[in-house]
Image: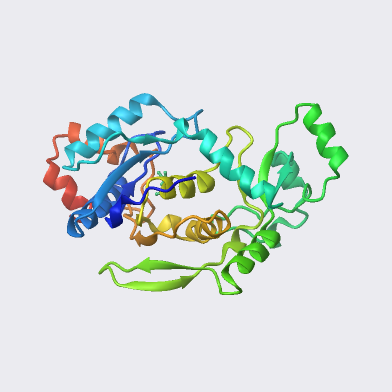
């Protein structure tokens, strides 16, 4: 794969998923990336993260363009849509598989839950989901072929132990780290702990990609040098950095910005229609008022 180089210009992106209306938290995220790009004389790209084809809607994409333009942002075109790049994600998954780092998992959610004997004491990933208990990690070749012959759907999971061993071989034993930028732009080196995610799903059952695989592929393909996104995705960066090492992709710097909280102290969510940018605009709020709500 060739990677965009952008002639060394800092390159930022905002990468919304079109499965709901953007809210004030998205405005903060988009404005953060856009302002940093302006300050550094860099590029600002938009990417539509629509691998979840069952939930993505075209009218939300139109709405994203409208909302972002309304809050005063501009971006380069054409806009990348993940759903147009499934072959690229597949090629990356094939590469991991060729190194023996992926294995098929046919287990349903129910079967996974049933395989966890002591739910209360079972370790969870940073998102709070129970770590995969590993029941399909060592299926025999014959079993895999038979299940595939029956048309049983399967995900591809990362064999985390092997992946870590391979990553350490690549780094020459150095720990897996990434460059993190504080609010004032000062860099620091963070030690990543991808093992927290266990045998994460790299290719989903329903679509030939996953958020993690698509995001590292796209960031490399688009030459993203700076990833600005919310702190809710900070832990995922550990897994992203591991994938970048395994796939020989460049390492962007990461800035994880604060999250806006609603009156009850909860993170804004797409289901909170009341705070959607669209609704705020319809209610007659000005662009400046909305920018101020997002802290700009
Ligand atoms: N598509 C993700 C979201 O809307 C953001 C992914 C990212 O910035 O890495 O939450």
Compared with 124, 154 (above or below) is above
109 left or right of 248 in image: right
Q: Quadrant of residue 89?
A: top right
Is residue 10 at all visible to an observer of this figure?
no
Percent across and percent down for residue 245 are: 54, 60
Residue 106 shown left or right of residue 278 in the figure: right
Identify which residue is drawn at 44% across, 45% down: 218
Could you tell me residue 33's position as x and y percent?
27, 53
Q: Which residue occupies 62% across, 47% down?
A: 95
Image position of 105 with respect to 296: above or below: above
Image position of 124 (left or right of 89): right
Task: Please count the marks in the image.
Answer: 0
Figure check: 37 above or below 89: below
Q: Quadrant of the C terminus?
A: bottom left
| Residue 132 in view here | yes
Question: How is the protein colored in the picture?
Answer: rainbow
Q: Which quadrant of the figure has residue 17?
A: top left
* Percent coordinates x, y for residue 24 in the rendering: 27, 46
Q: Nearer the viewer, residue 215 or 110?
A: 215
Residue ID at (31%, 39%): 22
- Residue 151 is situated, as x and y percent measured from the top left of the image, at 75, 27
> Depth check: 142 or 105 in front?
142
């Amino acid at each position: 794969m060739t990677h965009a180089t952008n002639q060394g210009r800092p390159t930022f992106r905002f990468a919304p998923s079109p499965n709901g209306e953007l809210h004030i938290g998205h405005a903060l995220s988009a404005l953060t990336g856009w302002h940093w790009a302006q300050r550094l004389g860099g590029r600002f790209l938009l990417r539509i993260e629509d691998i979840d084809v069952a939930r993505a809607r075209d009218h939300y994409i139109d709405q994203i363009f409208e909302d972002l333009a309304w809050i005063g942002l501009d971006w380069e075109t054409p806009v990348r849509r993940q759903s147009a790049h499934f072959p690229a994600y597949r090629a990356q998954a094939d590469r991991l598989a060729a190194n023996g780092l992926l294995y098929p998992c046919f287990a349903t959610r129910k079967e996974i839950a049933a395989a966890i004997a002591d739910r209360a004491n079972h370790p969870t990933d940073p998102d709070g989901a129970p770590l995969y208990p590993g029941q399909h990690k060592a299926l025999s070749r014959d079993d895999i072929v038979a299940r595939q012959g029956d048309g049983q759907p399967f995900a591809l999971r990362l064999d985390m132990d092997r992946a870590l061993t391979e990553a350490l071989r690549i780094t020459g034993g150095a720990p897996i780290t990434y460059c993190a930028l504080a609010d004032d732009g000062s860099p620091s080196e963070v030690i990543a702990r991808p093992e927290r995610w266990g045998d994460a799903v790299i290719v989903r059952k329903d679509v030939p990609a996953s958020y993690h695989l698509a995001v590292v592929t796209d960031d490399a393909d688009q030459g993203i040098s700076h990833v600005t996104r919310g702190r809710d995705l900070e832990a995922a960066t550990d897994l992203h950095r591991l994938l970048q090492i395994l796939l020989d992709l460049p390492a962007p710097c990461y800035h994880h910005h604060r999250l806006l909280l609603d009156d009850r102290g909860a993170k804004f969510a797409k289901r909170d229609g009341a705070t959607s940018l669209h609704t705020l605009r319809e209610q007659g709020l000005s662009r400046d008022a909305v920018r101020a709500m997002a802290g700009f």
